[in-house]
Amino acid sequence: MGDRAEVRVLAVSGSLRAVSSNGAVVDALALLAPDGVRVEVFRGLDALPHFNPDLERGTAAIPAVEAWRRALRECGAVVICSPEYAHGVPGALKNALDWVVGSNEFYAKPVALVNAAPHARFAQDALAETLRAMGAAVDGDASVAVRVSGAGLDAAGIAADPALSSTLRRALEVLAARARAAAAELADAWPDGVPRP
């Protein structure tokens, strides 16, 4: 893979609210994508059924689960921006992660965590731990905190703010570089492109 090959980044908000700081951040990331990076926002967390291991093998019959897994398979990296509820990861996001524990879509996948409320650290730490347990490559250099929660900014407002936009764009640049390196490593380790943990 060339140094400037396009990187597809999947951006996920852990909030299901129609208007949320976390949703605004992931939408802003799509506006701020640097050259060579395409950010696609995943909007299907609310369509996923409650995780049930008994149903896991038959997920082809669950379109929402297959759409989630396909979106992860087709991207080179993931950005997650999640709120914190009662010192924890929101149930909808944890449920989404549970659906891909066994199918390995996060294995070796570069992931950046964006915290829109820097005073809230419990969920971020728990999310990072869960992702690492799943084999994801959580990138500390690409993971950033931005003071967006409570600021009343939409995606355009975030993208127009010099400090916020600079921080988020730089995070995408770092994540994209990591994704290119990971893709090169994958090509060397597994010539058929199928990672095997």
Image (cartoon, helix red, strand yellow):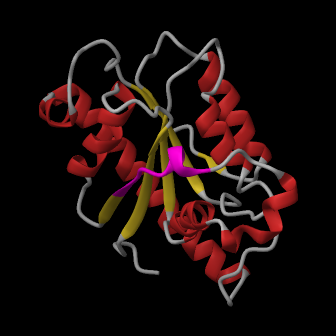
Nearest the camera: 74 or 114?
74
- Magenta run includes residue 115: no
Say whether residue 101 is left or right of residue 108. right
User: In the rendering, at what x and y percent does residue 19 appear?
Assistant: 30, 29
Nearest the camera: 124 or 54?
54
User: In the rendering, at what x and y percent does residue 176 appear?
Assistant: 42, 58
Name which quarter of the figure residue 192 lies in: bottom right
Q: Is residue 34 above or below residue 141?
A: below
User: In the rendering, at what x and y percent does residue 16 appear?
Assistant: 45, 34
Write the start and end of the magenta stretch as one range.
40-48
Farthest residue, direction left: 160
Residue displayed at 64% across by 31% down:
91
Q: Is residue 136 above or below residue 117?
A: below
- Magenta run includes residue 41: yes
User: In the rendering, at what x and y percent does residue 72 appear?
Assistant: 56, 63
Say whether residue 155 is left or right of residue 139. left
